[in-house]
Image: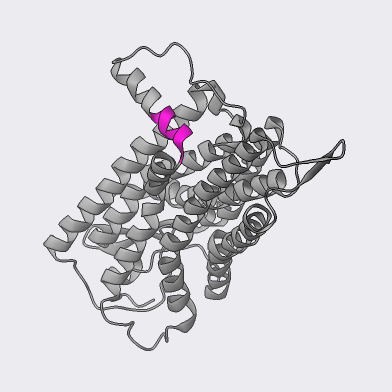
Amino acid sequence: MEAEESLSSQFLLNNFTNTSTELLPLTPFTYPPLFQCLIYTLYSAIVITAVFGNILVITVVLTIPKMRTVTNFLIGNLALGDLLMASFSPFGFISILLQFWPFGKLLCLIVTPFQCVFVFVSAWTLVVLSLERWWVIVGKAKWRKGLVFWAIGGVWIFSLVVSLPVGLVVGVRDAGNERMLCEEIGWPSPTLRLSYTLTLIFLQYFLPVSVLASTYTRIAIEIWWKKVIPVLECSGSMYTKSVREERMEKAKRKTISTLLLVVTCYTLSWLPLNLLYLYLEIIQDEESDPFPMIEYVYVLCHWLSMTHSSLNIFIYAFVNERFRDGFLTVLRRCVRSKPQNQAPTADVVSMMTL
């Protein structure tokens, strides 16, 4: 890489691990103050909403006994991943706008690999959620709570292992003018770096989305397209489903509707950024300049991907009544406006709802 390469080429092409891909030299670039102010405002709104909202989700799952279901434990783990990702995101967007790393070597070594870990935790918790719902609805068997804790542990171990190479190669480089760049400087060859980057994109986005599409399609067929009110024969008479069975079917549909919204938000929010990475890694000619306004396109794609960490709270609040009631219960406790000595009562389908 030539010495005159601009700072922009290092931070514009960051992937979700906040490391440079060093794909092409760009002319020096500085974002206008008004645009920087807008981006700071938008990112700050995401961080505040995500931190507050995901803490609220975790609190509801942990403190309200009837919300401690297998599905909700997975939702709590998803909230934890989103919470940590949102907490670390200011390092990324500030360095992107400034075009250098102002936080020192230690934070570079800590933030970069763990950003990757938290992204994978969110992605693969969604996968485990879909598999758990498939197992319950299609396989007609419930997960035990012990199994879900093993699954959560497996998600974290997998995320740490996949992100380990980032921690081994990341470091800081002097960019002159008392500025540092936080980037992957330890790769033995560009080919190895490219192979790992494409593997990350596949494991973080395309494989999870494929699994999610497959499992939820099968679940949708089971719930919506199959005959949902079968006729039962008993003592020579014909009876339709009981009220309890119909309520269970309705609860299943509500659960799946909520999770489908979560998955759709994840898919759409991360799609533009991953397509941009693929374009820069594979399609973009190294000898030519990128398309116009790429600096702005990248920041907007990065911001859109980060919005996922704050969207789930709104889905739970507006779509799922049990979570909405849980949020109100926790908030009342916080402001001490109404004593809450016991958790809300659960109906007969509590294990089927979120």
> Seen in the image, is 34 located left or right of residue 138?
left
Q: Nearer the viewer, residue 299 or 178?
A: 299
- Residue 258, compared with residue 33, is above or below; it is above
User: Which residue reaches farthest left?
Assistant: 34
x%, y% of residue 47? 31, 45
Residue name at image x 60 percent, y 46 percent: 129
Residue 132 seen from this side: yes
Q: Nearer the viewer, residue 258 or 92?
A: 258
Q: Which residues are magenta?
A: 320-327
- Residue 180, compared with residue 8, is above or below; it is above
Q: Quadrant of residue 269?
A: bottom left
Residue 6 seen from this side: no
Q: Quadrant location of the C terminus?
A: top right
- Residue 190, compared with residue 48, is above or below; it is below
x%, y% of residue 14? 39, 64
> Seen in the image, is 263 located left or right of residue 54?
right
- Residue 318, compared with residue 32, is above or below; it is above
Q: Nearer the viewer, residue 303 or 242?
A: 242
> Seen in the image, is 82 located left or right of residue 136?
left
x%, y% of residue 319? 43, 43
Task: Reply yes or no: does residue 135 show up in magenta.
Answer: no
> Seen in the image, is 32 located left or right of residue 310?
left
Q: Quadrant location of the N terminus?
A: bottom left
Q: Nearer the viewer, residue 4 or 330?
A: 330
